[in-house]
Amino acid sequence: MCWKFFLLPVEVKREAVLARQRPEINSKLKDVTVAILGAGGLGSNVAMMLARLGIGRLILYDYDVVEASNLNRQNYGVRDIGKKKVERTKAHLQEMLPYVEVEARDRYVDGGELERLYDEADIVIEAFDGVESKVLAYDYFCEREKPYICTTGVAGIHGKLRRKDLNNIYVVGDFHGENRNDCYMPKVMAIAAMECRVVLELIDQEEDIHG
């Protein structure tokens, strides 16, 4: 029957999706692996933006499930509630952009995991909720050379967003306190976009992100 034709998936090539970006940038992006530590408000949206940019491979970390209270700012829908964040993020990305390689790791990130991912990822993005995990990862990358992008001060409505570059560490946010009960989509998305912009700048500047 003719109507079945419209149910068939449309094959869209990477080059067509990225046609409004510079070819030389697209070529570099394809060879980059980014690890995202957390798949919540920041991480799920960072993953979406990086996939749309054309990053070749994403490694997603989180061990949590989607809750109703996540839907105001995280890249999930009602049907995702109760399901693993990394698995749902991977599914959403591959549905939108099937050329993106996504690895979902449903696990807690400790010191040992940081050691394992260090050799795999060219750039690491922090998107943790917990302060303890933020401090652990920050201290780990302070003693190394690989680019590490992290945040501070995501909560609240007000606060001027800034960025500080400290050797291989790139910090974005309003540099005020954190409050998980005071989170709003515009600010979360703005900070997620700032993290992605650092990734794009690093690649455009042809820095030695492959270590």
Image (cartoon, rainbow, N blue to C red):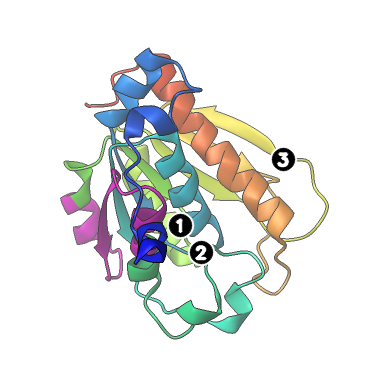
Location of residue 63 with respect to 16 vertically, above or below: below
Amino acid identity at mark 2? Val
Viewer-proximal residue, 40 or 145? 40
Q: Residues within 10 Å of mark 2 (few under 14, many from 20)?
A: few
Residue 106 at x, y percent in the picture: 28, 70
User: Which residue occupies 50% across, 65% down?
Assistant: 40
Q: Amino acid at mark 1?
A: Lys
The kind of residue on which mark 3 rests is Leu
* Percent of width and height locating residue 22: 44, 16
Q: Quadrant of the N terminus?
A: bottom left
Q: Write the start and end of the magenta stretch as one range.
A: 90-116
Q: Which mark is residue 131?
A: 2
The residue located at (16%, 52%) in the rendering is 116
Residue 54 disc label: none
User: Which residue carries the number 1 mark?
Assistant: 134
Where does label 3 land, which residue?
161
How far is mark 1 from mark 3, CA to CA? 19 Å
169 displayed left or right of 185: left
Q: Is residue 166 magenta?
A: no
Residue neighbourhood size for the residue with mark 3, other residues' Cα within 10 Å, grouped as few (<14), some (14–19), many (≥20): some
| Cβ atoms under marks 1 and 2 closer than 8 Å | yes
